[in-house]
Image (spheres, rainbow, N blue to C red):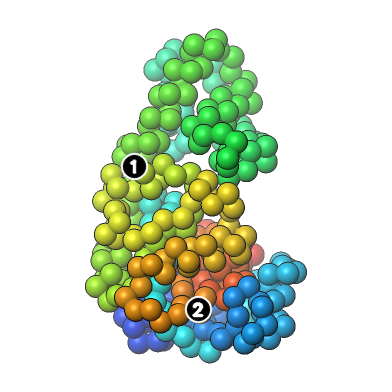
Amino acid sequence: MVSVALKYAGDRLLQQRTLMTAASPFFLRGSPAASALLAGSSSSWLGNGKHGHDNHRLYLDAPQKRTMGTWPKLRPKRIRMITFDVTGTIVSFRGTLEEHYLGAADKLGVHNVDSSKFTDAFSQAYRETSKLHPCFGGDEMTAKEWWRQCVLKSFYYAGVTMDSHTAEMLFQRIYSTFGSINAYEVFPDAIPFLNWANRHGLVCGVLSNADERYGDSVLPMLGLTHDELQFQCFSKDLRLEKPDPRVFVAAIHKGEAFLATNEPIEPSNVLHIGNDFQKDFEGARRVGIHGVLLDRYKEDELAGEW
């Protein structure tokens, strides 16, 4: 049912109780983590030792691989701010990678593409481009140039050869598609939950490893404006990526301006919701922020690792 899970989450959030439901797409993996969702802490920012204990600092200084259930429960704290990952959390892709990329190639007469190899080719190109130019190019290049390199490498690794003119037309076609509403859709429970959160005075914002085009065009076209998401933090702008603790701290500082009162906010007043265990859940918890891990796609194999 539309927004049932998020409405349930909201009710639990107000009541300072457990946030968990398995009866909807908005399923929170792992009961130990869910039962500790609203667990707060008086631990200091980035473990400066002012209020907390040494173990809080260890989350930042010496990250270790751990499962969801091994994260400690903390004392309850009132949630005042929620940050959201984007893709796989509030927004989903329409169609498949192959449909968009190979469909564009086909329209330009580029037919010598092995579709069975393309997903791996794209993954290789994405990893390589990310390693060479972190944070979608940061200060050194535009996000569009970053994507040009990634897209054309994808076809190269898939064994495609084409002249420079065709390559540029192909890139422009693909880049335009992913800057439009044709490649995305909002999960049906996202906007009702955001509206509920805003009605109850919770500041909401985006915290995503993405480039700024999401905020400039994609989210507004999908009806996710500054009315629903008051602030936005993208890795391209921050020059940092989750799970770096500085990303979460930057998001809190940016969201502070939208709080209704001047009461100081602590990490334990913040909830982060995302679909990546290491980047979203662990990244948030290491800073003292509450973390909720979403399983939109019933990823049972990954859940075994969590």
Answer yes or no: is residue 17 visible: yes
Q: Nearest to the eye among marks 2 and 1: give it.
A: 2
Q: Position of residue 37 (x, y in %)?
A: 49, 79
Task: Tell me which amino acid carries mark 1.
Answer: Ser
Answer yes or no: is residue 118 visible: no
Q: Which residue is mark 2?
A: 266
Screen quadrant of the N terminus: bottom left
The part of the image, by quadrant, that contains residue 61 is bottom right
Say which element carries label 1. helix
Residue 220 versus residue 17: which sits nearer the camera? 220
Measuring 41% from the left and 56% from the top, which residue is drawn there? 232
Q: Position of residue 116 (x, y in %)?
A: 57, 30
Residue 211 versus residue 106: which sits nearer the camera? 211
The part of the image, by quadrant, that contains residue 248 is bottom right
Comes first in the chain, label 2 or label 1: 1
Say which element carries label 2. loop
Measuring 48% from the left and 63% from the top, which residue is drawn there? 251
Q: Which residue is mark 1?
A: 217
Seen as rendered, the residue at the extreme front is 262
Measuring 59% from the left and 75% from the top, which residue is drawn there? 45
